[in-house]
Amino acid sequence: MPLVENADIVLHYAPKTRSFRALWFLEELGQPYRIEHIDYDKGAHKSPAFLKLNPMGKLPTVVDHGIPIAESGAILIYLSDRYSSGVLAPEPGDVRRADFLRWLFFAAGVMEPAFCEKFFKWEIPARQVAWGDFDSMERTAIGSLSPGPWLLGDQFTAAGVFMGSNLHFGTLFKLFPAEGPIADYVARCAERPALKRAMAMEEKFIAQSEAKGSA
C-alpha cells in the first residue's frame, strides 16, 4: 500500500530494527499508513514524547487513530482483527485461531529469548526458564512449517509475518541451517510482494540514513 501523508495508522520506524517486521506487516495489511522516522543515534526513542507512546522506548510502535500499540504481537493482532479479520487473522470462533495465537506468542516469548541463549551462550536449565531451550524451540519451529506452505496451511496470516521475520533473522545469523524447512519457508516469504516492497523501502531508508551520517 503506498504511503499516505495524512494516514491514521502511523508506524514509528528506524532501519535495521524490529520495526521492519511491522513495515512488512503493514504492506500485507493494505491499509493507508505513514512512517514517523525515529533517529536512534539522537536518542529519539527515549524522548519524553516517544516514551508516552511506548514506555519501553522500543520499536516497533504503531499509533492507530491516536491509539498507541506497542509489542510486535499486540500490533499484529490488533490491526489484523480491526482491518483484516478472516484474512490475516482467523476470526474468533474459527478453530484455527488457537494456532494463530500460539505462533504469535511463540515467536515473541520462546524464539527471541532462545536466540539470546544461543548468541550469548547462556547456560540455563531448560526447566527453569519459560522458553525451554534453543533446540526445543528449533524443533518446534520446524514442526510448525509442516505441511505448509504457511503456518495455517494455505492461509498466510500475521503470525506468518512474525515467525517469518524471526526465522529470517535466525538464518541470517546462522542460528539455523542454510538448507531445510526453515530456509525454504524464509524463501517462500521472500517471494511475497508485500515483503519485496518492504525490503525496497528498508534499503532506501538505510541508504538515506548512511548518506545523512556521512554528510
Image: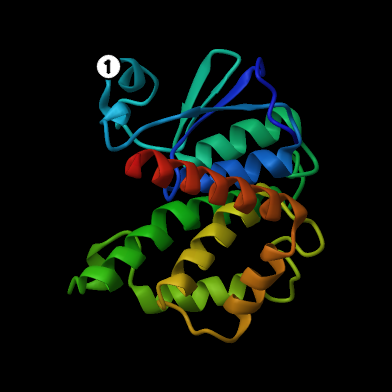
Give the residue displayed 58% in from the left and 86% down from the top: 179
Q: Quadrant of the N terminus?
A: top right
Q: How is the protein colored in the picture?
A: rainbow
Residue 92 seen by the camera: no
Placement of 50 over or under 112, stated as above or below: above
- Residue nearest the observer in this picture, 169 or 102: 169
Between 101 and 5, which is closer to the camera in this rendering? 5
* Residue 111 locus on image (x, y percent): 42, 62
- Residue 16 shows in this picture: yes
Q: In which quarter of the image is residue 146?
A: bottom right
Three-letter code, disc 1: Pro
Q: Which residue lies furthest to the front in this view?
A: 215
Looking at the picture, tell me which residue is in the foreground, 86 or 72.
72
Local secondary structure at mark 1: helix
The residue that appears at 53% across and 66% down in the rendered structure is 168
Q: Does 115 appear above or below 69?
A: below
Above or below, 178 against 187 in this view is below
Residue 3 lies, in percent from the top left, at: 68, 30
Q: Few, some or many C-alpha atoms within 10 Å of disc 1 (few <14, some 14-19, many ≥20)?
A: few
Foreground pick, 42 / 109: 42
Q: Residue at x 44, y 52 (%)?
A: 108
List the residue tagged with mark 1.
Answer: 48
Q: In which quarter of the image is the C terminus?
A: top left
Residue at x-position 80% and y-position 43%: 87
Furthest residue in direction left, as rendered: 123
Residue 55, picture quadrant? top left
